[in-house]
Amino acid sequence: MSTTVRTPTPPSLYDQVALETASVVIRRYSTSFGLASRLLAQPIRQHVENIYALVRLADEVVDGVAASASLSDGEITERIDALERETVTAMQCGYSTNLVVHAFGYTARRVGIGEELTAPFFRSMRSDILETEHTQESFDDYVYGSAEVVGLMCLAAFLEGEPVGDTERAGLTRGARHLGAAFQKINFLRDLAADFGTLGRSYFPGIDVSTFTEAEKRRILDDIDDDLRIARASLPGLPRTCRRAVALAQGLFEELTERLRATPASVLATARIRVPNPVKARIAAGAAVGRLPRARQPRANATATAGAFGAFGARDDNEGDGTA
């Protein structure tokens, strides 16, 4: 059931501290999304930062500091279950002792994010604890829960208070889902080496990282291009208050996609590709003046390969170390 949108009240001192805490998370963990968020008008920027902070917190539970603290899989599962319960409570009553969860609840209650989005998200997070390989069905479910619903959460913030008709909303919803899916798949491909070498994990169904081929790489990238084209088509329909920021995020990931396409499959299986900061700055400058990502022509085999691996996420650029 969706969370009812409530009439905003002035933030308390505790609210303000929680919101400031969430803002620190996106600045420290992601240069790309942190950069894009600066182009958002308030209060949308704060809402997106609050969403990002919860997503990052959950990801740290299943893939980060919890494992580093030598917690067992069962103990990590208990922690992510507790985080979900705390999140639902914050969405219902507007309070949490966890500052990041409190900030998310603050946003959820104002823009109408409900358990229909948070439940799939936490389900995908739990799957990371035990699953190391995916079937097509489990991959599609994972991408939806870990990335597409995050795009839908952000869309709820973008459209709060905007007069949007049902047909227009449906188009924007489709675009948000495909953009979230594209971001996640791009990150899976970029992090192929680390996921397999460090976590023993392979997200793309039917892919053996140790024998990753050019044909497999092209097939994945063609599917990503299809997602990006659908997302790009919805950009002009977004409110001006958020359009530049979304265009910047998409532009940065499209640049990364081109670099992944230009990198041999054998290299992707052993190294992490990034977008240099000067290139990010150039893309950001264009987005700041309202330039949308250029429409790319479909590749000859894109139609045949689109959807071969399923359709803003838990796995993002994770650039706390300054890399992309």
Image (cartoon, rainbow, N blue to C red):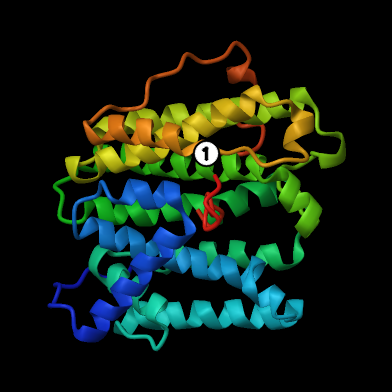
Give the residue at the far front of this rendering. 278
Q: Nearer the viewer, residue 163 or 190?
A: 190
Residue 73: quarter of image:
bottom right
Residue depicted at 26% across the width and 85% down the height: 14
Residue depicted at 21% across the width and 85% down the height: 13
Mark 1: secondary structure: helix
The amino acid marked with disc number 1 is Ala
- Kindly identify which residue carries mark 1: 182
In the rendering, at what x and y percent does residue 103 appear?
33, 74
Q: Nearer the viewer, residue 36 or 323?
A: 323
In the rendering, at what x and y percent does residue 99 appear?
38, 81
Residue 1 visible in image = no
Q: Nearer the viewer, residue 255 or 240?
A: 255
Q: Is residue 211 left or right of residue 46?
A: right
Q: How many marks?
A: 1
Residue 29 visible in image = yes
In the rendering, at what x and y percent does residue 6 appear?
19, 72
Quarter of the image with the C terminus in it: top right
Give the residue at the far top of this rendering. 300
In the rendering, at what x and y percent does residue 200 appear?
81, 56
Quarter of the image with the N terminus in it: bottom left
Residue depicted at 37% across the width and 69% down the height: 22
Give the residue at the far bottom of this rendering. 97
Rendered position, 238 above or below 66: above
Label 1: few (<14), some (14–19) or many (≥20) C-alpha neighbours in 10 Å: many
Residue depicted at 48% across the width and 59% down the height: 29
Rendered position, 289 above or below 161: above
